[in-house]
Amino acid sequence: MSAGTMRLIGAAAMLLPAAFAAAAPACRSCAAAVEPGWRYCPRCGSPRVGLATGPGDAGKILAGWEGPTAKVYRDPASFRGLPPGEARLSLARGEYEAVQIVLYPVPDGAERRVRTLSFEATGLAGRSGAIGAEHLRLSAVGYVHPPELSYGRDHPGPHPDPLATSWDAAPGVVAVREGELQPLWLLVHAPAETPPGLYEGAVVIREGGREVCRARVAARVRGFALPPEMHLPAAFDFYDIRPSYPRRGDESAAAYRDRIEALERAYYVDMLRHRVSPMRNLGYPAFTGIEKGEYRFDFTEFDARHRFYVEEMRQPAFAVAPEWPDWGTDRFEQWKPAKWIGFRNPAALRETFRAIGRHLDERGWIERAYVYSIDEHPGEWTRQICALIRAAHPGLRNLLTIMVQEGYPDVDIWCPRMYELTPERLALGRRFQREGKELWIYTSGPNPPFPTLVLDWDLINCRIIPWMCWKFGLDGYLYWCINYWERNPWTTTATYPGQNGGGFLYYPGAGGPVGTLRLEALRDGLEDYEYLRLLRERVRDARPRGLDEALLGEAERLLAVDDRIVRSFDSFAYDPVLLYNERERIADCIERIDAAVAAADRILWDFEDEGALRDWRRLDGLVASLSPEHATGGERSVRLEFPAAGERAPAFRREGPGIDFTGFDRFEVDCRNPGRAPVRMSIKMKSGNHARQVTFDRPIPPGEAATVSIPLGPLASKLDLADITYLSFFCWRPGEAGVLHLDRIRLAGGGRR
């Protein structure tokens, strides 16, 4: 074993590729065999792994590693780390994944010195490319001191939570007392264009400028990519940050306003990078007056925020009104006029939402909008408010955080608390889903044994919630606040009474947001959800191709989520290694299906290099270029920029020697419309001397991807399928320019000649 590597007894084997495999040991206490995926011995309950040092290690800085969904406490006796040597992680293209490098300054005598260490991560290099240091983030994990509260906690003493050691911690430096553990959080992001393969690098630890430890890191980048879209809305409210960032003595009002706006934007951007949606970050339109009986609003700032957060950053859902300000007030005239967009009467409310709904509908934005007006307040008044909003504009969706029940016909998104969603209520919610409504889930305070986001419970509680949403068919997840800082969370973790970490997943930092282990675990769970969704898409697309039923059956079992992972809302896997293993099985299955599909397809053009574009003409102003965005098979797609159509439609056309389409079932192409309006794509085919031709139209919804599949069987009487000499892609969008990405133009369903 090399110097500077923590010695661990045993191993918690992860189901990783062969290059990463670790031997499964016997229990160190009773010698019982321990199956991979379990951290604790099933016979005696002792941990599988532990920390051991030798006499020659005194005074050294040793380093082990731990996965991203386990907490590392200060006491070395509590360490449950993973195998020694190379820290290993696996991630898809476009994904964020972390590993913890755990430092242990070995005591040298009775005195426990405090050692000041600096740390940095090198970039990761592989045969096919590199993941630069700019895509790695290395942070010292901080500790807080939560009081023991009524609901209990998973470990006494200080808890790891913030991804910094203090409000104004210097980056790249940490002070560690000898005899205590200090984890470093290494976050790796594989950009979408990263070639698949193994990438290696290191975390370097120095003391006084001298290298004292080097921990090796290996990241396996998968062959598939996570979509930038967030398919499980995770809506979190965001409260006013000014109390935590007060105005400085010499700061002008304008400078302070600009600083707060920049800080808010930094928090919103970081939330979306964690696949978490701020509820009300688009703000509200400004009321400008009443003209000819219509309420008028200025949407300039609202529209600008929509362009950035929804269109550029892919925010999946947003609220269009603040919450009802006065709980228990059931009359309009008692409302605080300035707090709910100035509503004073039912007519004002109706006309305001009519204007908002019309504006959103005209721009194609209304499907992502919701009105979260009343919180946990069932009753007749709530029914009346929902009915008024529905009457104002039927496209606006009412979200209600109450128990699923009959008698609320104008509720579109049901969002009960998790512990309220009994099997009977879940069945009712599914009936509402069949009627076109959505069923979300809501967690707030700790309700053991149901998972929640408090900081004194294990991180699996945060990561497992998206798995539950998948297994039980839920459409979204809501949490009441992400920055509830009524008291300073650095010193008082119960900022909301009775909950450690309740209502906050960020700490305020001098330079902006300081994230938490809990927020990282939640993002991992949301990315796990995307893995499951990708696998479902693969199965759906592969089944008509006649692929191996055993492989598809395995995929279906993974999609069902085994009871070992989630049995019910209050029964789930507590060992994160079980979750890691299941995630790797899902990733393996995705890649195996991709390989099977590729073997049955004939790729005509994959647009990986400029040579693929030489076959294609650009007509009537169309611009075609290779792009790293929205690639489905390799690293690039072709980006088609269509100018506003005139008398002729701009086209992307291939004319040349005939291609033999016989022996295949379908002609297919992967498409993506990144814009905010639908695209009607047309495909024209001709055979021989162009005397025979067919044209197909396919709508591509805004912001969505689609595989356009054209059955070839019915074309045998219309074209000579052995001699297809002409292909053309064009869009009819009179008066409006647009963009479309294409990839993997292919013949599918072969192998049955």
Image (cartoon, rainbow, N blue to C red):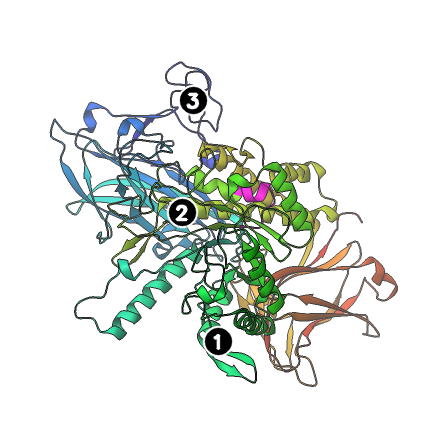
Q: Position of residue 371 (x, y in %)?
A: 53, 61
Query: Which of 562/394 is in front?
Result: 394
Q: Is residue 16 visible?
A: no
- How much space separates mark 1 and mark 3, taking CA atoms? 63 Å
The label nearer to you, 1 versus 2, is: 1
**Residue 614 higher or lower than 171, as above or below:** below
Q: Which residues are magenta?
A: 467-476
Residue at numbered disc 1: 299
Q: Which mark is residue 25?
A: 3
Q: Is residue 240 visible?
A: yes
Q: Are marks 3 and 2 in contact (CB under 8 Å)?
A: no
Report if residue 473 lies within the magenta region: yes
Q: Quadrant of residue 590?
A: top right
- How much space separates mark 3 and mark 2, taking CA atoms? 30 Å
Kind of residue sitting beneath label 2: Glu
Kind of residue sitting beneath label 1: Phe
Residue at numbered disc 2: 520
Instruction: Residue lying at the far top in this picture: please name it.
Output: 30
Classify 10 Å Cα crowding around label 1: few (below 14), some (14-19), many (20 and above). some
Q: Secondary structure at mark 3?
A: loop
Classify 10 Å Cα crowding around label 2: few (below 14), some (14-19), many (20 and above). many
